[in-house]
Amino acid sequence: MRRDLESIMQYETSTLTLTKADLADMLFDKVGLNKREAKDMVESFFDEVRASLSEGDTVKLSGFGNFQLRDKPQRPGRNPKTGEEIPISARRVVTFHASQKLKGMVEIHYAKLQQRYSNQ
């Protein structure tokens, strides 16, 4: 029975989640930090990213991407239940733009998955 390529690829790519605990475990395994130091290092990294963004700075991670703040103006919206028009407040949001290097790596991985499952 031939498997549906799109559903297999979607399953393979959607089931993998990298958590802060996973990052700490990798530091423990690969760098040799003890578990407490590894966890603290991961937390410190994210604390610095949060602090920089909260101060209005852009965070640039070479070879990975940029986190930037973007101001969104007020805009009209609609209550889906009543249809009543309501304003959506202006707000500041964090955006992420992947680097070309990261995009290329994702594309290579996707091509390998396509090749693997198209041969079945």
Image (cartoon, rainbow, N blue to C red):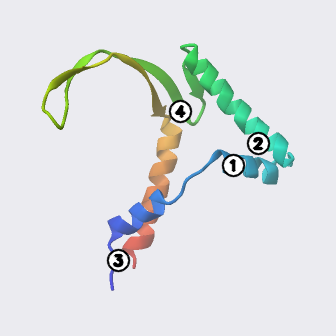
Q: Is 23 drawn above or below residue 79 in the view shown?
A: below
As drawn, the label of residue 56 is: none
Q: Which residue is mark 4?
A: 65
**Of the residues tagged 4 and 1, which is closer to the observer?**
1
Q: CA distance from mark 4 to mark 3?
A: 34 Å
User: Mark 4 or mark 2, which has the lower sequence index?
Assistant: 2
In the rendered image, which residue does mark 1 sit on? Answer: 21
Q: Residues within 10 Å of mark 2 (few under 14, many from 20)?
A: some
Q: Residue at x 48, y 45 (%)?
A: 104
Q: Residue at x 33, y 86 (%)?
A: 1
At label 2, the amino acid type is: Lys
Residue type at mark 1 is: Ala
Foreground label between 3 and 1: 1
Amino acid residing under circle 4: Gly
Between 86 and 108, the one lying in front of the other is 86
Q: Would residue 73 appear left or right of 51 to someone viewing this image?
A: left
Crowd rating for badge 3 (residues with CA inside 10 Å; few <14, some 14–19, many 20+): few
User: Which residue lies under the disc numbered 3?
Assistant: 3
Image location of residue 93, percent across then percent down: 43, 23
Question: What is the quadrant of the C terminus in the image?
Answer: bottom left
Q: Which residue is mark 2?
A: 39
Q: Is residue 119 left or right of residue 44?
A: left
